[in-house]
Each structure stands twice: as C-alpha cells, then as structure tokens.
Image: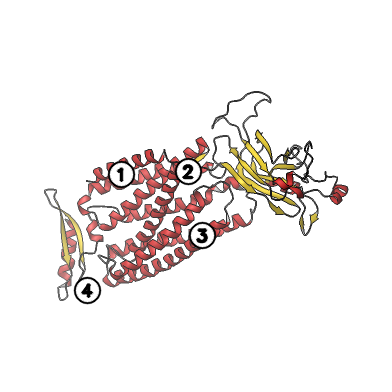
C-alpha cells in the first residue's frame, strides 16, 4: 500500500514538472524596462535599472573579437539590449532639426562601495547628482552631466555610458553593449538625465545580468547547491521513515500519517526549489508556473507543520483521540496562516529581480510574524496542560517523550528568536547589501531549523512494534482515572503479542507489580 502511494506521488511530480516546463516564463535576472518613467530626485531625473551581487569574471575576452557566450563560460557582465529613451514631442521640437546633440542621457554603473563617487556637494538639502554651473567652478565637473569621481582602485569606475538625442528625434538608443565585471561586488545601475528639457522621459529595453556560473543573482547562487543538499537530506529521512512505516504498518497511528505528509511536502519543496533555481541559472528566465507551485507547496508545508506541532502539543493521538471542539479553531488558524504565508512568498519569490527586498515584503512579513507569535503561545500553553495530564496519570513513557519534545521545541524557539535578532542586525548594519555573499544563510537557516525539528519529531514518534502504547487507548480514562498501556511480549515460539495491563480501583497493588515484573522478564 505504502509503495503504491509513493509511486503515484512520484508520477504526479513528474507529470507536473513536464507540464510546468511549457508554462510561460517571467524575466528575472533579465531586467525589463517597459516605458518606465524618469522620476525627479534632487537636480536629476533618473530610473533605477537594477541592483545585484555579481562575482568577478574568471577572464575577460579580448576586445574586438567575437566570443560566443554561454551560461557557464566564466564571464560576468551586464549586457544592454536595445535600451531606448523616449522624450515628448514638445521637448524634441525645442531643438534645431540638424542639432548633433539635443539631449544627453547617462547610464551609470557603480559598485556599492563606490556610491560616494557619484554626486557632489549638497543641492537643495540633499546630495547633488548633476553638475551645475556653480559646482562646475567649485569641483571641476562638467555642467549638465553626472558628477563622477574615479574609484581609488580603478579609474574607469564608476562606469558611465552616454546616449545622445539627435535633432528632433523622439528616441535615442543604445543598441547592444556588454560591460564586463572585473571585481566582485554589489552593482547598481541607474539611467540619469541632468537636462530639465527631458523631464517626463521614459526608457524601454532590457539588461541581462550574469555571474560566472550562470544567470542567478549573486545572493541566490549558493541556494541552488543548498537545495540540492537539502533534497538529499530529505530523501534519507524519508527512506528511514518509510522503512519503519512499512515494517510496522499494522501499528501506524493517525499522528504518524501527519508526519509522513510533512516529510513528503518538505521533499517536494526542496526538489521544486532546486529545479526552479537550476532553470533560472541556465536560461536567465524564471518559469512562473514552477515558481508558483513551489511557493504554494512551501506555504502548505509550513502551515501543515505548524498545525502538526500544535496538535501534538494538545495531545492528539496520545492523550485525546481527536481535537474535539478545538478542530474548527485550529483549521481557521491554519487557513489564515496559509493565506498570509502564500502572499508573502509570492511577493518575495515570483518575479524577483533585485537582490534588495522591496517595501511590500516588509509589510507582508508582519501578519506572518504575528501569527507565528500567537501559534507559539498556544503551543506552549497546550503543551503545559498535556504535561500536567500525563503527570497526573503517572504515564512515565508518554511523559518522557513529551518532555523531550518540549525541550526540542524550547531550543527551536530560542534559536529562532536569536536568529531574528541576528537577521535584524545583519540588515540594519548593511543598508547597501555589501555583505550579499552571506545573505543566502538568512534564508537557509529556517529550512535547516525546520528540518532539525522534523527529525526530532520523527525520532520520538517513529513507527514501531510498541507504537500503540503511545496512543490514547481508553476515552473513559479521564472519567474513572484508568490508563491502558501496551507492552510487547514475545512468546517462546517467537510470536509477538500485546498484553494490556489495566490498573483498576480496588485491585491489589502488589499483584499488579508482580505482573509487571513478570512481563518484563518475559
């Protein structure tokens, strides 16, 4: 039965992968500009063209020589494809028909470490980007252009590319150009105009950002290897769990069905993440179908795992056979958490371009954080009540398991709080993402922590020949203070049987003790 289900699940995954491979793709590491308007910042008009961590090229191809580029050629570059600037007809008509230069637009590429090399003295309460007549006299810059100070390490950086309008043309174009990256860093791209007559200008086209190993942005690149390792880890966990599951399938509890579901969801999520990143890295595009599926599976896995922990804390399958009147509240909380989680994940992953998180993600983090806090409070409150019930019933085996579970849960919560503090510190002290190479650890930690807690749960509630002694076996036990525990007994012939020891009111305690000792000897 278990083997049939596993085969069906595998076939389902393969069919979905085939279907998703033909879904339309969304450009991601390829930044698209679809008539994006310039906005006024200080004395300049600009459009942000992107921001990504890029590793240095392993070599630079010789100039003026054709070079066939591929995803894994060891080159890092920013390529401009048909970048076109559009101005209004009124702005174009202000210039002579034969004017050689009737408007200048500059493309600025700089590393985060060289951000102070762009701009000059304050202008209107903020740093001036463009050179004015007064600043031209003070700083020696060229009026009407971006103020640029050469880097101490490379005089050619920050990189500036000029695009000029001619006569009364409505558009100016930079057809195709590649800027090779020689130094590892967080690179920023801006389209800037210092000409007030070009107010209201727009830009279209695209830029392709590439790292030596492919098109994944620098912060995401290590995650592809991480998800490959996590896939192997989940396969090992699933293999060990399935062996126990098949071996003792006659004694499997409803709680263990839920654990199996969480393992399966975790494995699917890691597999889908790896395929998503591998496709993205090889092509520079991100399949929206595959990314959406992995986001949905991840949200289901997180929701289901949290409800599993809550149900265990309430004593489901151990102290009580069902959640009773709490079922509706638990399901309502699960649905709410799923919706909040999937909205956050879609904003963070589907169509992601830059290595810098947007404001929308910050706003969507708050509901998820509040729900997590409420879940933690409910879990520990329920866990405390369950421990009290087990102590009152003197159920030493179950009590020991729950104490180990509560210790693991406490360590997980402490580690989570400590990591959140570190994450806040990491981001607060790195506003320009200069430590982007270690940013992947922020994402990876939560997957590692979830996997670790799942391993603990699998260890404590693994299927075995004595699984039934962990289960709630007598609903009336709460009314007449009875408890039934199942002990394993092996007959001389090698047959396994379950002997139930009932402790009843009025029975001779010495007889019960003798029976227990006899059972242990057998």
Q: Give whichever of discs 3 and 1 has the lower sequence position.
A: 1
User: Which residue is at the far left?
Assistant: 493
Q: Give whichever of discs 3 and 4 has the lower sequence position.
A: 3
Q: Residue at x 48, y 65 (%)?
A: 370
Q: Nearer the viewer, mark 2 or mark 1?
A: 1
Q: Residue at x 43, y 68 (%)?
A: 377
Does residue 108 appear to the left or right of 386 in the view shown? right
Q: Nearer the viewer, mark 3 or mark 4?
A: 3
Q: Give whichever of discs 2 and 1 has the lower sequence position.
A: 1
Q: Nearer the viewer, mark 2 or mark 4?
A: 2
Does residue 192 appear to the left or right of 512 in the view shown? right
Q: Which mark is residue 324?
A: none
Comparing 5 with 319, the one in front is 5
Q: Which residue position holds label 1?
A: 9
Does residue 385 appear to the left or right of 67 in the view shown? left
Q: Which residue position holds label 3?
A: 365
| Secondary-structure class at tag 4 | loop
| Secondary-structure class at tag 1 | helix
Distance, label 3 to label 4, CA atoms, is 46 Å
Comparing 38 with 464, the one in front is 38
Can you give x and y, in whole percent of width and height, for residue 346 in the image? Answer: 48, 52
Can you give x and y, in whole percent of width and height, for residue 219 in the image? Answer: 56, 45
Q: Give whichever of discs 1 and 4 has the lower sequence position.
A: 1
Q: Which residue position holds label 4?
A: 481
Distance, label 2 to label 4, CA atoms, is 51 Å
Q: Give whichever of discs 2 and 4 has the lower sequence position.
A: 2
């Amino acid at each position: 039965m278990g083997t049939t289900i596993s085969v069906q699940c595998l076939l389902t995954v393969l069919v979905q992968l085939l279907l998703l491979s033909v879904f339309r793709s969304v450009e991601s590491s390829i930044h698209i500009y679809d008539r994006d308007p310039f906005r006024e910042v200080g004395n300049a008009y600009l459009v942000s063209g992107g921001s990504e961590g890029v590793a240095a090229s392993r070599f630079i191809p010789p100039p003026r020589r054709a070079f066939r580029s591929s995803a894994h050629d060891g080159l890092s570059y920013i390529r401009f494809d048909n970048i076109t600037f559009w101005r209004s007809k009124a702005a174009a008509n202000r210039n002579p028909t034969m004017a050689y230069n009737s408007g200048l637009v500059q493309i600025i590429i700089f590393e985060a470490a060289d951000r102070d090399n762009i701009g000059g003295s304050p202008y209107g309460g903020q740093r001036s980007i463009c050179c004015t007549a007064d600043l031209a006299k003070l700083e020696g810059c060229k009026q009407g252009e971006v103020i640029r100070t050469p880097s101490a390490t490379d005089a050619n950086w920050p990189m500036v590319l000029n695009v000029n309008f001619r006569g009364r043309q409505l558009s100016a174009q930079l057809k195709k150009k590649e800027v090779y990256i020689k130094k590892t860093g967080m690179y920023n791209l801006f389209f800037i105009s210092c000409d007030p007559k070009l107010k209201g200008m727009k830009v279209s086209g695209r830029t392709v950002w590439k790292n030596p190993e492919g098109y994944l942005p620098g912060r995401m690149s290590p995650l592809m290897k991480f998800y490959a390792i996590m896939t192997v880890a989940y396969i090992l966990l699933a293999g060990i769990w399935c062996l126990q599951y098949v071996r003792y399938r006659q004694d499997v509890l409803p709680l263990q069905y839920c654990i199996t579901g969480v393992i399966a969801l975790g494995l699917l999520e890691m597999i889908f993440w790896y395929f998503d990143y591998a496709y993205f890295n090889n092509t520079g595009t991100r399949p929206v179908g595959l990314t959406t599926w992995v986001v949905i599976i991840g949200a289901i896995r997180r929701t289901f795992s949290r409800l599993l922990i809550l149900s265990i804390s309430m004593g489901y399958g151990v102290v009580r056979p069902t959640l009773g009147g709490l079922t509706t509240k638990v399901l309502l909380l699960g649905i709410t958490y799923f919706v909040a989680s999937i909205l956050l994940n879609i904003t963070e992953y589907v169509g992601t371009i830059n290595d810098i998180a947007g404001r929308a993600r910050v706003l969507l983090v708050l509901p998820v954080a509040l729900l997590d806090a409420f879940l933690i409070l409910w879990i520990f409150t329920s866990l405390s009540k369950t421990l009290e019930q087990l102590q009152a019933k003197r159920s030493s085996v179950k009590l020991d398991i729950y104490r180990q579970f509560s210790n693991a849960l406490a360590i997980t919560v402490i580690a989570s709080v400590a990591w959140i503090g570190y994450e806040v510190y990491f981001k607060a002290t790195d506003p320009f993402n200069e430590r982007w190479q270690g940013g992947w650890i922020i994402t990876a930690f939560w997957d590692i922590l979830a996997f670790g807690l799942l391993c603990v749960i699998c260890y404590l509630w693994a299927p075995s020949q004595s699984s039934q002694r962990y289960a709630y076996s007598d609903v009336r036990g709460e009314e007449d203070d009875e408890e039934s525990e199942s002990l394993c007994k092996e007959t001389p012939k090698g047959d396994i049987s379950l002997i139930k020891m009932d402790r009843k009111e009025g029975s001779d305690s010495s007889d019960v003790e003798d029976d227990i000792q006899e059972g242990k000897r057998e």
